Amino acid sequence: WSPEVVTVVDNAEYTATFPATLNEYTVRFVDDNGTLIGEEQTVPYGEKPAVPADPEKEDHTFTGWKSGDAIYTDATIPAVTGPAEYVATYAIHTYVVTFMNGDEVWITDNRYYNTKIAYVGMNYPTKEGHSFSGWYTAEGDPIANGTLVMGDMVLYAGFRINTYNYTVEVYTMDLFGNYGEPVVTTEAAEFGSIVDLTGYQTGEHFYLDGENINSKLYA
């Protein structure tokens, strides 16, 4: 106080005085895991701290420095009014998983980095005479449900060919023109493959859905 305070003997007025040196405060910049970035700074009241270079985090983009509910950039960091701590904030990268059915896009799915591919509830593509077998890379490597997404991915529908049973019934005519009990043979063949009927005796006739196809190769 100025002047020096003395015992009151009359009306008096005193003026507050302050030292020329400003108060200084500690400012810290830390990563989102609490690791100190750079060094602690001692900054005079009213001045701005030195903001570190933007930190990096794998598959994330730095978005600013958070203090309380506010996020600041290098340009918007406020002047010091007391101790402060700023925490680095990041946005996780998003990647596109593209599911292909042949040369056509079946669906696309946006996934965050290091999250899992989910097939549950997916409507799988179909192919005549085949069963869906899973999703594969262009090199033919299977990609299981729950595989972690680490970048953009293109997956291709895989199919396995179906196998079907077919039955050949051979009836033999006797001298009186009567047919006896058939000789039944059951075989298996893949969809679209050729069934060879030429190994039976000459003169036998074969029918498929009522059509006489005789002894021949039949798809």
Image (spheres, rainbow, N blue to C red):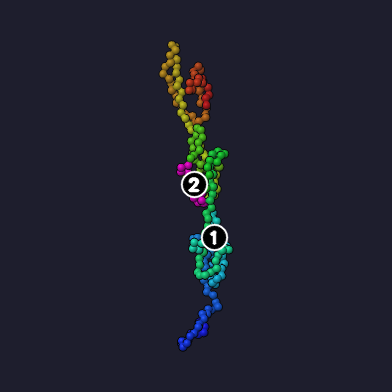
Q: Residues within 10 Å of mark 1 (few under 14, many from 20)?
A: many
Q: Amino acid at mark 2?
A: Ile
Where disc 1 sits, the SS reads strand
Q: Which mark is residue 117?
A: 2
Q: Identify which residue is drawn at 50% across, 30% down.
A: 191
Looking at the image, residue 192 lies above or below residue 33: above
Where does the image place residue 58, in percent across and percent down from the top left? 54, 55
Where does the image place residue 22, in percent across and percent down from the top left? 54, 75
Q: Identify which residue is drawn at 52% across, 51% down.
A: 113
The picture quadrant where one finds residue 177 is top left
Q: Identify which residue is drawn at 46% across, 42% down.
A: 121
Q: Amino acid at mark 1?
A: Gly
Q: CA gap, disc 2 to disc 1?
A: 30 Å
Depth check: 105 or 2 in front? 2
Where does the image place residue 217, in percent across and percent down from the top left? 53, 24
Depth check: 191 or 209 in front? 209
Please identify the dominant SS of the magenta region: loop
Query: Quick one: label 2 or label 1, which is nearer the N terminus?
Result: 1
Q: Foreground mark, 2 or 1?
A: 1
Q: Which residues are magenta?
A: 111-122
Looking at the image, residue 21 lies above or below residue 118: below
Residue 18 in magenta?
Answer: no
- Residue of label 1: 64
Q: Identify which residue is drawn at 51% across, 21% down.
A: 213
Where does the image place residue 14, in percent across and percent down from the top left? 50, 82
Looking at the image, residue 199 lies above or below residue 136: above
Residue 115 in magenta?
Answer: yes
